[in-house]
Image (cartoon, helix red, strand yellow):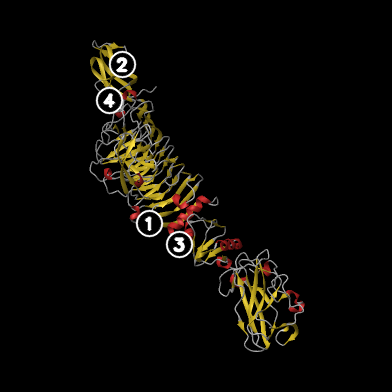
Amino acid sequence: MNKALTDGVVFMPPPFADGLNVWSSEDGTPGSNTYDGAFNAALVPADQDFDSCLEIFKNDDNVKLTYMGQTPFEQGCYLRISAKVKAVSGPLPNVRAVAWAAKSGGSHATGYVEQGPSVPLTAYGEVVEVSAIIGSGSRNGVDMIWGADVAYAHLGLEMTGSNGGIVRIDEIVIQDITGAYLRDMMDWVDVRDFGAAGDGVTNDRDAFLAADAAANGRTVLIPEGVYRITSNLTLHSDVRFEGTISMPDNVYLSLTRSFDLPTYIDAFGDEMLGFKKAFQALLNYADHEVLDMCGRRLDVTAPIDMQDAVNTMTKFEIRRVIKNGQFYVIDGPAWDTSSVTANGSYNSNNPFKLTSVSNIASIKRGDLITGNGVGREVYVRDVDVASNSITLSQGLWGASSSQSYTFTRFKYVLDFAGFTKVNRMTLSEVEFQCNGEASGVRLARDGENAIFQDCFFIKPKNRGITSIGRGCQDLHIERCQFISNEQGLAATARQSLAFNMNANDAKIRDNRFQRMGGTAVMHGSNHIIQGNHMFQGDEVDKGPRTSGLIFTYENNNTVLTGNYIDNCSVELNNEHDPKPNFSSEYSFGGMTITGNIFVTIDAAAWFNFIIIKPYGTGHYVSGFHVTNNTFRTYLGNINRVEGVSTTHATLNGWNYRNMTFENNAYFGVNQRTISPVLLEYSQNSNASTWSLDAGEYMPFGGKARRCSGLVFEDGLKDGANAAMHEMPLVKLAQGSSNELVQLKWPRACRGKVYATIRTDNPV
């Protein structure tokens, strides 16, 4: 860069021979005294060394020769003042280059060095060059370092020392030597050339902005040093860090052309701080929507509080993406799970509150709550210390009005729980190497459309993804893998969980869940679960199997399609219902299970693939369809594929409605489950009552409630061996367990019938 060439800026003052009225004997400002007609100055037309020159008699302690023209100064420019001088007679003085720095309005820009090094004249007739360099950066050879408030200067020479000497001065030369420091052929600009100190104390923000403005497509270089930035900074050029930045927690750095994690790590010299600052910028600037980790592995030594990293907001509702990297958990006490106990009062009429909570200062948002009558995956959503109350993520199905609870605190690599609401936050191609020390991600308290795509959760200690409120609304988990840290344990000994749901509309597709303690605890409704592989087997001979998918909202309106459900079960219950007895709500159902592969290996014979577990009385099944699935066992049969857990209550089989269990394939299952079932019955002896037993086929202990068709093969014969054409009276739900359909004939007869019997009322 050379302003004389590129912008036509004139730096050189006129020669002395053109007149001395522009040469001041003071600081060069308007109105100052000039050498025009001065007694102590004269033009010398011919000097053996200088040709034309100016001769000055030093008659004062400080004699100046200052050009009154305004020599422009810009950040990033370097100017050199030089002149050749020689002593002619009298005492030998010292000579130095001097300047008077001015602001744009003409006032003095104080606080800067305004003189160069002093050069002594030691012999008469010896030509000596006096020079100094002015610039904006603290670079080698720069004598006067000026800031951005300097607009122009008056430049010249000053003679000090003994009086009475005569000195001759060749023309004063002012040159733009920026090219010596900052050559246009280089593809970078250095922030030091624009006044950056890099001392960790001086605020270098203005220098960074000036360098960015001057870069014009080149890279801004931040050389070694610590550069203090005290207010928000946006750089629009590519940036390369050799030094680091220091800034307060609530100050943002936006790198619009270099917005990626490695650059932020370089900028702050610390991986975790760099990630936090990059995330802070991601949420605070519209210039970025994706934080690319560039395949970087980030060693994580403590949970990352995502809201604290942003520092200035608790709600964010615009799409943002974190992609393509790995969080690698480093063992340490920061990951230790802790727990406290406290008493609290509960009223099912206020189902999401615990009141009169003791020891409340020790309870934190996000703690898992356990105790009598508490369902799985109930969390502390908020803590109100002033009122001794806690907001819960779910209701409690059977808690006493006052009892003791345990609050367990898991530690998460990424913790969004400090946010009241986050919408459309996407994590894509991110690997969480939890190493059995940490859990993965804790969602915000509220929000929608959190998306996890192509992510890996490797060996989470407790949880993969946790929702402590309704931040899971419309949760997407797609093509992710959850690999347990408990694979060597028996299935019943594992405690880890891939994820939980409190809200509606989840899309869980094409994932793999490997030997977790459970795949999911899902409240809410309208979920789509498709194409996943979940397996929870172990090496225990004839071992128990645990629930993989647990639906805790009775009528969940869910589609479960095309999954590979391996050594685990699908469980429907109402453990999050604060009033678990049936009243007027929809009961269990609203669910379609179709086209899935169900497999178990070496499981206990009593294992069931589909379980309904009511936590209160009076419930039934309605709108529930299990069709076109394959059920297969290896290394031993199971008795049947479905069942009811009666730990707390039974189902009301008289109210089953609109339920089908048909067109499934069974291998290694002792008793097939079918409803409606086409039952073949042969009455070989004459009888007036035929009892058709459909009970073993009926799902969930259902009753033989409907007979929708009777087809008789080869006709009927009565006791006289005559053909019989009368139709029977059909009696439903007969027998001690209501499992029989009885055909009542007007007289004894025999024959074969195909009866279509179902356990529900389909109308």
Q: Earlier in the sequence, mark 2 or mark 4?
A: 4
Q: Which residue is mark 2?
A: 730
What x and y, as percent, mark residue 699?
31, 29
Q: Amino acid at mark 1?
A: Thr
Q: Amino acid at mark 4?
A: Gly
Tags 2 and 1 in contact by the CB under 8 Å rule? no
Q: Residues within 10 Å of mark 2 (few under 14, many from 20)?
A: some
| N-terminal-most mark, 2 or 1 | 1
Between label 3 and label 2, give the one nearer the viewer: 3
Q: Which residue is mark 4?
A: 695
Q: Which residue is mark 3?
A: 269
Q: Assess whether mark 4 and mark 1 are in contact (beta carbons under 8 angstroms).
A: no
Upstream in the sequence, badge 1 or badge 4? 1
Q: What amino acid is found at the position of numbered circle 3 in the picture?
A: Gly
Q: CA distance from mark 2 to mark 1?
A: 72 Å
Is residue 596 at all visible to an observer of this figure?
no
Rounded to the nearest whole Å, what is the CA distance between mark 3 and mark 1? 16 Å
Q: Earlier in the sequence, mark 3 or mark 2?
A: 3
**Kind of residue indicated by mark 2:** Val
Q: Please tell me whether mark 1 or mark 4 is closer to you in this view.
A: 1
Of helix, strand and loop, which one carries label 2?
strand
Residue beneath disc 1 = 301
Residue 684: quarter of image: top left
- How far is disc 2 from disc 4 in space, using C-alphas? 16 Å
How many circles with numbers are drawn on the protein?
4
Q: Residues within 10 Å of mark 3 (few under 14, many from 20)?
A: some
Of badges 2 and 1, the one in the foreground is 1
Q: Is residue 747 visible in this depiction of the protein? A: yes
